Image: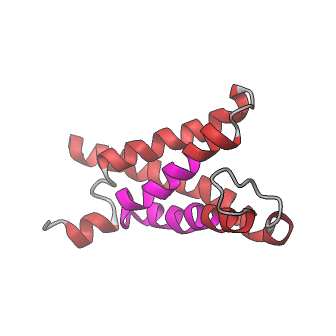
């Protein structure tokens, strides 16, 4: 029936789609509330609140869509991991663990995807399997 490679790829597909959809919700909320958030969004690395918000939206929406599709997966996971690292270490540094925990979970998944890649059930595999 399924060999181990197919099962692993199915697991990576499930992880990519689930985590991509969950993060897409965060990004969509930021898009919808852009006007209210633009001047008050955290600016932990000195880019300005509005640019920080745009960068977070770019990662959370754009890179999440790429992750779901399995297109440029390893590269798409980098801005997502960076965003979660900044949230974990800088934005929520003084918060209790239960506030930081979600960023840590997302970060661990993105790092895992950077290391493993998307698996066979991805556009990366379809487009670049010869490489």
**Quarter of the image where the C terminus is located:** bottom left
- Residue 110 locus on image (x, y percent): 45, 47
Q: Is residue 125 above or below residue 8?
A: below
Judge left or right: residue 99 versus residue 67.
right
- What is the quadrant of residue 40 in the picture? bottom right
Observer able to see residue 125: yes
Give the magenta range. Answer: 57-84
Query: At 49% across and 56% down in the image, what residue appears?
Result: 17
Confirm whether the magenta stretch covers residue 69: yes
Judge left or right: residue 9 versus residue 47.
left
Judge left or right: residue 69 versus residue 87.
left
Observer able to see residue 1: no
Judge left or right: residue 29 versus residue 14.
right
Query: At 65% across and 41% down in the image, what residue appears?
Result: 90
- What is the quadrant of residue 54 in the picture? bottom right
- Dominant secondary structure, magenta: helix
Query: At 59% across and 66% down in the image, what residue appears?
Result: 61
Q: Nearer the viewer, residue 58 or 1?
A: 58
Confirm whether the magenta stretch covers residue 27: no
Residue sticking out furthest to the left:
130
Residue sticking out furthest to the top:
97
Q: Is residue 53 above or below residue 10?
A: below
- Residue 126 locus on image (x, y percent): 25, 69
């Amino acid at each position: 029936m399924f060999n181990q490679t197919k099962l692993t790829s199915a697991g990576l597909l499930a992880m990519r789609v689930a985590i991509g959809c969950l993060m897409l919700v965060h990004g969509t909320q930021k898009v919808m509330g852009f006007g209210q958030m633009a001047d008050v969004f955290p600016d932990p690395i000195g880019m300005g609140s509005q640019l920080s918000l745009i960068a977070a939206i770019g990662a959370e929406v754009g890179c999440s869509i790429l992750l779901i599709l399995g297109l440029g997966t390893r590269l798409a996971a980098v801005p997502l991991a960076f965003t979660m690292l900044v949230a974990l270490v800088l934005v929520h540094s003084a918060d209790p663990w239960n506030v930081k925990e979600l960023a840590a979970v997302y970060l661990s998944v993105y790092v895992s995807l950077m290391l493993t890649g998307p698996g066979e059930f991805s556009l990366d595999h379809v487009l670049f399997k010869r490489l």
